[in-house]
Amino acid sequence: MNNLENGDLRVFVTVVRKGSFSAAAEELGMSAAFVSKRIGMLEQSLGVRLFERSTRRILITEEGEQVLGRAQLILEQLDEMVDELAERRREPAGRLRICSSFGFGRKVVAPVIARLAASHPKLQIRFEVFDRLVDTIAEGFDLDVRIGDDIPPQLVARKLMDNHRILCASPGYIAQHGMPASLQELAGHQCLAIKEREHPFGSWRLRGRDGEEETVRVSGALSTNHGEIALRWAVEGAGIVLRSLWDARSYLDAGSLVQVLPAYTQPASVWAVYPQRLAGSGRVQVCVDFLRRQLAQD
């Protein structure tokens, strides 16, 4: 296939994955009208109708399903070829879709991605952040930089950085409400619950120094789906928060927060997670190695 058709196949696969022309257009950086035009040209070239269109939604046709399987295979082979040629030149090239969580992605990963792009100008990187756990395979991401040690077995995971979550609160909150002496005493405190990505809401699973894990139910007047908001509330004296050490460290160093029950932590290392089919991808491995070196340096 020529370059135009390869591009149209990528548009087609993206429309199927996103479920609409407009969502695919947003991801691809095109207009919805242009995406529709490319799909029309692909249908004309193949001589089949790929979608049944209505005012509310699009449905892939039986012929479209057949084309989808072949299109995915063609694009994977094309990406592998680009990887192999780039590896020979020792210069990674091609498209790379990376995702992460809101807070860690914005504060830590995004600056590293910018340095990665500067070091390897032939990479085309799209970076997205979410407040939920991403289905890396179904949503078409090449790499997910995630915090937490529960990794599905169908994904490849490489550790980028050791990390754990700690309990902390402001000195003012502790002065007013007292320092809890046990996990059980947390039930009597204002705890700032976070519903963020894989975190179970209102339930904190913590590991003691003996390695044993305990789960405590917590509650409070304030809760949020954003970890940075909860951390800000904790600094302002609203309650006790469970937050990653990388995020809380500057506040601990400044004295704005103090650690609560330091014998208990929650393991939450930083991982690069990607589909099995990309285990041999040169551009993914370059990205993972770059991330690991930069995070260790930072």
Image: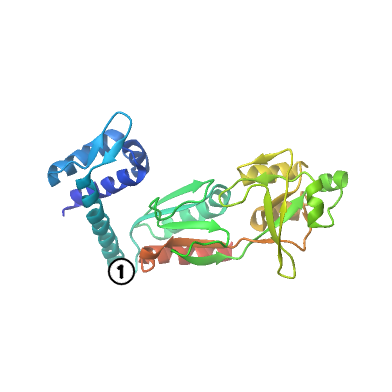
- 177 displayed left or right of 73: right
- 139 displayed left or right of 164: left
Image spot of residue 116 (x, y percent): 45, 58
Image spot of residue 255 (x, y percent): 78, 52
- 87 displayed left or right of 297: left
- Looking at the image, the residue that sits furthest to the top is 55
| Residue 274 versus residue 31 in the image, above or below | below
Q: Amino acid at mark 1?
A: Arg
Q: How is this picture coloured?
A: rainbow
| Point 82% across, 45% down: residue | 173
**Quarter of the image where the N terminus is located:** bottom left
| Point 69% across, 43% down: residue | 232
Q: Secondary structure at mark 1?
A: helix
Q: Is residue 293 visible?
A: no
Of the pair 27 and 264, the residue shown nearer to us: 264
| Point 27% across, 45% down: residue | 11
- Quarter of the view holding residue 148: bottom right
- Quarter of the view holding residue 193: top right
Q: Is residue 130 visible?
A: yes
- Number of marks in the image? 1
| Residue 296 versus residue 46 in the image, above or below | below
| Residue 33 versus residue 262 in the image, above or below | above
Q: Residues within 10 Å of mark 1 (few under 14, many from 20)?
A: few
Image spot of residue 127 (x, y percent): 44, 50
Of the pair 19 and 293, the residue shown nearer to us: 19
Q: Which residue is mark 1?
A: 89
| Point 69% across, 54% down: residue | 204
**Quarter of the image where the C terminus is located:** bottom right
Image spot of residue 109 (x, y percent): 52, 54
